[in-house]
Structures are given as structure tokens and as C-alpha cells.
Image (cartoon, helix red, strand yellow):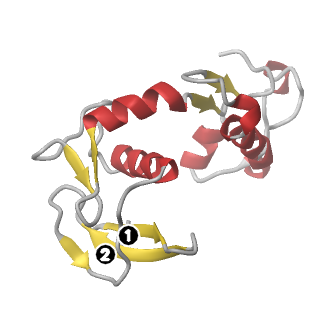
Amino acid sequence: MVDGGWECTVLDSSIVDRKADVVDPSTRKVILGRDQRAVGVTGTGVVAALYCGMYGGLIPNTPTIETEDGRIHLQDGVCITSHDVEEAGKAIGALRAGFLTLLLEAGLWTGDVKKAYMDTIPLRRFGTADDIAKAVAWLAGDEASYVTGQIISVNGGMIG
């Protein structure tokens, strides 16, 4: 999100990502127009729009979109509907990152914690961003192509 709107990214004819329009996703208003044109949205674009929509309050309770017309407007008439959110939710699943998400939201990381309860973590170590990235890469890869709608816990075996 920039300049009071969402900065769209489009792929050019060489499949290189390019900065495109900055739009108000609620109203379709183009805040900053650029030369790049959009003809659709990729799966990655849907996930990015879902994240921004949830973070920005446009999707407070999936699959409901809280805009005047129930759509998130990207650029050049491309939009995300509640049906798109619902369908994406069937395939996306989720990762549970244990306390790492809480630390990140608090502006901390594992090196900032002086005392921890390692006896609650069977692997006896903190997780790392790399641990999460590996789980995401696996879930997004061919090895997990038949895994849908699951919650994968990346927490060293921590219960709770």
C-alpha cells in the first residue's frame, strides 16, 4: 500500500514484473496512473490481494468483502469478488508459526527474548524465518500439490 492506495504489479510480455497503477481498491479510483496494463490476476496476485484486504480491513470475515459493491478493485477492470475469496480459501490452507508471528507483530525476534520456556518446545530451539520459508516453499511446490485447506504447524512440536 502506497500513497493512499494499492500499488498494482503486472507482468509484461517477457513475464517481468512491473509497477503499475496505484488504485483505491474500494472505489476503483486510479490514484497514480502508469503505462502498464493488466488483463487478469495470477494466483500470487489473489493471495497478495487477500492479505492486503485482510490487513486493511476490507475483508474482516472471509469471504465477505466490505466495500460498497462487494469487490476489491485492482486495475483495468480486474477485481476480486467474495466468490474468489471463498474459492482461494479452499486451496490455500494455513501455516501456524507458533509464537514467531506474535514476536513479529510485537516488533521482536528470537534474539530479543532473554528467557524462554524451552521445555514447551520439543525440539528445544526457537524457530527461524528459514523454518517458515521452507514450509511455505514445500506447501507451494509440486510435492504438496494434493494438499488443500490444511493448517500446517511450524512450531517445533509445541502444543497449544
* Quarter placement of the N terminus: bottom left
Q: Nearer the viewer, residue 150 or 132?
A: 150
Task: Give SS at disc 1.
Answer: strand
Is 48 drawn above or below residue 24 in the view shown? above
Q: Residue at x 59, y 21 (%)?
A: 150
Q: Residues within 10 Å of mark 2 (few under 14, many from 20)?
A: few
Q: Position of residue 154 (x, y in %)?
A: 73, 30
Q: Can residue 35 be seen by looking at this rendering?
A: yes
Is 129 drawn above or below residue 23 in the view shown? above
- The type of residue carrying mark 1 is Glu
Q: Quadrant of residue 88?
A: top left
Given the current orientation, which residue lies at the most extreme right position?
Answer: 124
Q: CA distance from mark 1 to mark 2?
A: 9 Å
Whether residue 140 sits left or right of residue 93 in the image: it is right
Q: Quadrant of residue 95?
A: top right
Is 103 drawn above or below residue 23 in the view shown? above
Q: Residues within 10 Å of mark 1 (few under 14, many from 20)?
A: many
Is 52 drawn above or below residue 11 in the view shown? above
Return the residue at label 1.
7
Task: Give SS at disc 2.
Answer: loop
Q: Position of residue 125 (x, y in %)?
A: 87, 34
Q: Quadrant of residue 146?
A: top right
- The type of residue carrying mark 2 is Asp
Whether residue 104 sits left or right of residue 91 in the image: it is right
Whether residue 7 sits left or right of residue 102 in the image: it is left
Return the residue at label 2.
3
Camera-nearest label, 1 or 2: 1
Whether residue 124 sits left or right of residue 46 in the image: it is right
Q: Residue at x 72, y 41 (%)?
A: 132
Q: Residue at x 57, y 69 (%)?
A: 15
